[in-house]
Image: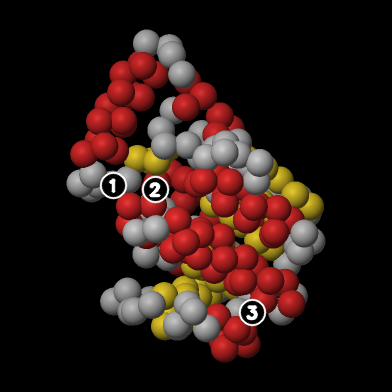
Amino acid sequence: MKALIIGATGSTGKFLVDELLADSNYTTVTVFVRKSTGNQHPKLVEQIIDFSKIDHYKDLIAGDVFFSCLGTTLKAAGSKENQKKIDLDIPATFARIARENEVASFVLLSAVGASSKSKVFYSEIKGKLEEKISELNFEQYIIFKPGFLLREGSDRLGEKVMAFVLKTVNAIGLFKKYKPVPTALLAEKLAKAPKILPKGKSVIELDEIFDFAKAV
């Protein structure tokens, strides 16, 4: 299978790239990035592009499985408009072109609580993206909806505090459904999903991620 990825340098995407490169089922791994990652591997293809002109690269968006791990925070984006471009507009454009180029499978890293009807901006745009991709009718459409992510080496104080709180309450049996997900583990599940799930739409909810594909 030929894999395509956006968000390949993010906290989950970078682990996903490693998983796909190590998996013999994937023959090539094409990443769309703004600048070179510096990684070298016989199966890795870097496409350095201008994300404001995605249609210019439509011939490159061809393969078997498309993984969308692109996302940001409002703080990093600087404005809701910029966050919408990154979390909704760019992935939706890639998805449209991928479908036009007959890519069969699409794997979306979304978020728990995503809904186009949500009053929370982040959840709203994630929900709208889920719907836009669903309308494209990929042969196989897989949505992962994790909650809090444990990012390796994160220097964000808020993340460290939240991770500590969740781990503490989980340890005493509270809020198990909100168990934080290590990004490396999430990447492993993402890579396995297209190989084992049937055609059609599949949604892997937060409380299902840990057990998903455990024995595979």
Residue 35, given in percent of the width and then of the height, sits at 34, 79
- Looking at the picture, how far across and down is residue 40, in whole percent? 34, 77
Residue at left offset 29%, top offset 76%: 38
In the rendered image, which residue does mark 1 sit on? 152
Q: Which mark is residue 61?
A: none
SS for tag 2?
helix
Tell whether 112 sits left or right of 185: right
Q: Amino acid at mark 1?
A: Glu
CA distance separating discs 3 and 2: 26 Å
Decide: few, some or many residues near mark 2? Use Cα within 10 Å; few <14, some 14-19, many ≥20. many
- Residue at position x 50%, y 72% from top? 29
**In the depicted view, which residue is nearer to us: 38 or 94?**
94
- Image quadrant where one finds the C terminus: top right
Quadrant (top left/top right/bottom left/bottom right) for the N terminus: bottom right
Considering only vertical position in the picture, is 212 above or below 49? Answer: above
**Which element is circle 3 on?**
loop
According to the picture, the residue beneath numbered tag 2 turns out to be: 184
Q: Are marks 3 and 2 in contact (CB under 8 Å)?
A: no
Q: Position of residue 209 (x, y in %)?
A: 54, 37
The colour scheme applied to this rendered structure is: secondary structure
Whether residue 181 sits left or right of residue 38 in the image: it is right
Label 1 close to label 2 by CB (< 8 Å) = yes
Of discs 1 and 2, which sits in the foreground? 1
Callout 3 amino acid? Ala
- Mark 1 surroundings within 10 Å by alpha-carbon count, few (fewer than 14), some (14 through 19), many (20 or more): few
Q: Is residue 189 above or below residue 211?
A: below
Which residue is denoted by mark 3 in the rendering? 62
- Residue shown at 38%/77% (left/top)? 34
